Image: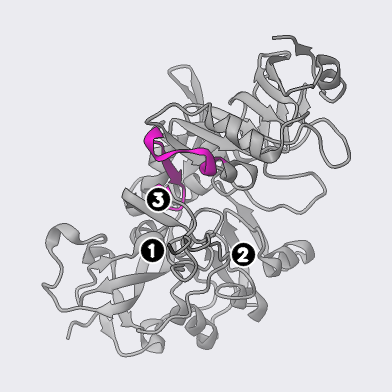
Amino acid sequence: MSKKVKANVAEALEGMSDGARVMVGGFGLCGNAEALIAGVIDTGAKELTLISNNAGSMGKGLARWLKAGIVRRVICTYVGTNEDLHRAMADGSIEVEIVPQGTFVERMRAAGAGIPGFYTPTGVGTVVAEGKETRDFEGRTYVLERALHADFALIRAHQADPFGNVRFYRTARNFAPAMATAARTTIVECDHLVALGAFDPDDVHLPGAFVKRVVHVPEHEDVIEFRTVRPLPEVQ
Amino acid sequence: MPYSKDDIAKRAAAEIADGSIVNLGIGLPTLVADHLAPERDVWLQSENGILGMGPFPYEGDEDPQIINAGKQTVTIVPGGSTFDSATSFAMIRGGHVDLSILGAMQVASNGDLANWSIPGGRTMGIGGAMDLAAGSRRILVLTTHTTKEGEPKLVATCDYPLTASKVVQRVITELGVFDCAGDRFRVVELAPGVTLDEVRAQTGAPVEAA
């Protein structure tokens, strides 16, 4: 078995330490690496910088980090119904940087691609651009945004092979590929561990070069935040 | 009689050209989907990574890993695709989304949009709003004409924090359809029975007749 495949979550999270910068994939609770998220609390690491779109919701997922008091700083795009984050922002216990979502992911994409910064039209003329360099290209103003790196990325995969090649499922993919490229150590929690060669090379979503560790976690809670349905059609 | 929420959504659907790629913001804009017949060939984009978003699933078919940007369970239509956030925002910022239909807290007559934060209120966050506002080829806003307290939401200058500057082309409210025309709003059409004077009384900027 490849050295990348770890026997359990604790082994997969080796080296998680105080003050680490940790990217965690997921759009709200969709596509969370649930076991790794829970496992970080058990490592005892604190003073973490959490880089995640929502930093949890409904008291679940990353909201548990907030409640456990192990986060010093959050970089996210949306707070929404995350009451734990609202509370932490209000009492000042956690420093929160809110970033436009496209800028958030592009900063990670840039970091992973060896690009230190880029100009974007997003946020020009708003508080997001305050104090940042702007530049005009062909008559339009753009703001300079910097690459966003991390020590660890914790991402959820549908399938992974022992080299760390990954396939995602539906909208669980979201920020995971960009985070995987931007972190020094990317740890994949996969629903299914498949054999080397099981993937058609054309079908790999994230090549193994971006993945350092893989842990197989077959069971997930996969919480639905807003269950919306339409009635079944009338049976004739 | 002023437009109902459903009338606003229906009127907004009439703004969409056949064959368009459209992003619907959270709230009132999501109702527009109910008024898009399949033959319109309209493709809904959801910034969390769907092109070809379908209606809510039938009861029992919900998949926690198929959600829209409002974190509601949805479906994917035949021909739809899923992709990562960097690709999704390349689609948005790169001008590949023809139209975004967004909600607003304030819209100024010059097209400035404020829809993410109320000073002194709870900050809900930016999400995809700034990228959609800055990157979409066209921005249509659906909103109530005033706040619950009766304050105009169509104003001369936004005093709430901006989402993007000079991006909104058209606004649909319960009182009618209005274009952002620089230092004024221009009436495109009034809801049945609504008078220009009523609109002017509830608007924080000059309003020019059609």
Host chain of mark 3: B
Span of residues in magenta: B32-53
Q: Nearer the viewer, residue A236 or A53?
A: A236
Question: Vertical placement of B166 versus B145: above or below?
Answer: above
The chain letter for the residue carrying disc 2 is A
| Residue A87 visible in the shown view | yes
Disc 2 element: strand
Vertically, is A41 above or below B38? below
- Residue at the limit of the structure toward the front, as seen here: A236
Q: Where residue B208 sits: x, y (%)?
A: 75, 10
Q: Which residue is mark 1?
A: A183
Residue B50 - label: 3
Residue at mark 3 to residue at mark 1: CA–CA distance: 25 Å
Q: Residue at x 13, y 73 (%)?
A: A198
Determine whether A13 is above or below B152 in the image. below
Residue corresponding to mark 2: A73
- B42 drawn magenta: yes
User: Looking at the image, is mark 3 or mark 1 nearer the viewer?
Assistant: 3
